[in-house]
Amino acid sequence: MVRDSGMAMGLLNQSSRTLFSLGAVATLAILLFAGCGRDEEGGPGIYAARGIVEDVDAEGNQVLIDHEDVEGLMPAMTMNFAVPDTDVLSRMSSGQVIEFDLRFTGRSYEVADFKIVGEAPEEEGWRRLRDGLVRSSPAPPFDLIDQGGRPVSLESLGDLVLLVDFIYTQCPGPCPVQTSNQVALQKRIPEALRDQIRFVSITLDPANDGPAELKAYAESRGADLEGWAFLSGPTDYVAGIVRSWGVGSVRKDDGSIDHTLVTFLVEQGRVMQRYTARASGDEELLADLVSLAQSRAKRRSEEDPAPGTPAS
């Protein structure tokens, strides 16, 4: 899997390792500001700017910044900028509050240099993940039944670290592959951390996927159901959940469902990352999952120390 930038700011949580579409935004900005009738101000030059680094594209030498008004050049917005100097780019990471030198060449907007002046605030959704910060967002709620007919809701899962995806049992290929990849991932989680994590798979086809069908599907692929819930519910309700998570799905004439293959990493009711599908054995996803599970285990041990353990 690869981290993906997605969901239009309800679940917008783009990873700093994701490629994003940069040229269109930069081109639009150039067209907008080129036609603003600038006389003495707004021409080529270097401008002082301030903002939050949202995402870094090391391969494309570009950065996404949510910046304040740039006096004499442009209003506040979230925009992509080129970073020609690789040394400058290498020092940038998501969640930094920076003051930067913005160079306008007349054709492009470039970050010439910057200094870190702070860290993006938690109240704006920023959370720590491994050695960096990510912008999280509230996970849409759900209240469904699992493969055993038991009720499962987002609330009932508490502050467990969740890995959420969307599948259906009659899927001709992509879903079984994705589930098999998740099974391989589940088996790699250290034994001591498995009770910190739950896998959650929500069906895209509740009319055909009841508890029995979901259980058969899960067992045929080797899922450990002690730590994995396969969920279904009323058709209209499930369709609303799918939309709220930003997962596109369209039923074709042959009955199959075209849909987005995406996995969401959730902690304490917030989406931390989303990942698009690729081959199993994803080291990045495993590292993210283990890191959050370790943090949860540490947090809970501090809240409820073992008998005889002195308070810190």
Image (cartoon, rainbow, N blue to C red):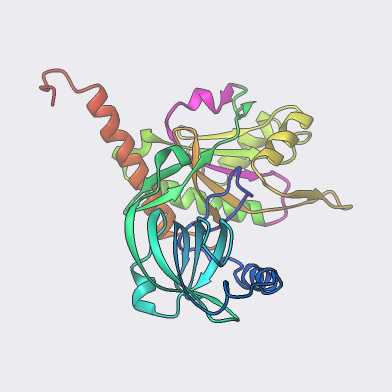
Q: Is residue 248 visible?
A: yes
Q: Residue at x 38, y 78 (%)?
A: 86
Q: Residue at x 55, y 58 (%)?
A: 4
Q: x, y (%) of residue 63?
A: 48, 67
Q: Relative to 11, is 153 above or below?
A: above
Q: Residue at x 78, y 31 (%)?
A: 235
Q: Tell whether 222 sits left or right of 117.
A: right
Q: x, y (%) of residue 206?
A: 74, 34
Q: Relative to 272, is 107 above or below?
A: below
Q: Relative to 45, is 129 above or below?
A: above
Q: x, y (%) of residue 89?
A: 39, 72
Q: Residue at x 58, y 53 (%)?
A: 178
Q: Which residues are magenta?
A: 150-173
Q: Quadrant of residue 35?
A: bottom right
Name the foreground residue: 18 vs 148: 18
Name the foreground residue: 308 vs 93: 93
Name the foreground residue: 266 vs 34: 34
Decide whether residue 152 is among the magenta residues: yes
Number of numbered labels in the structure image = 0
Q: Tell whether 197 sits left or right of 79.
A: left
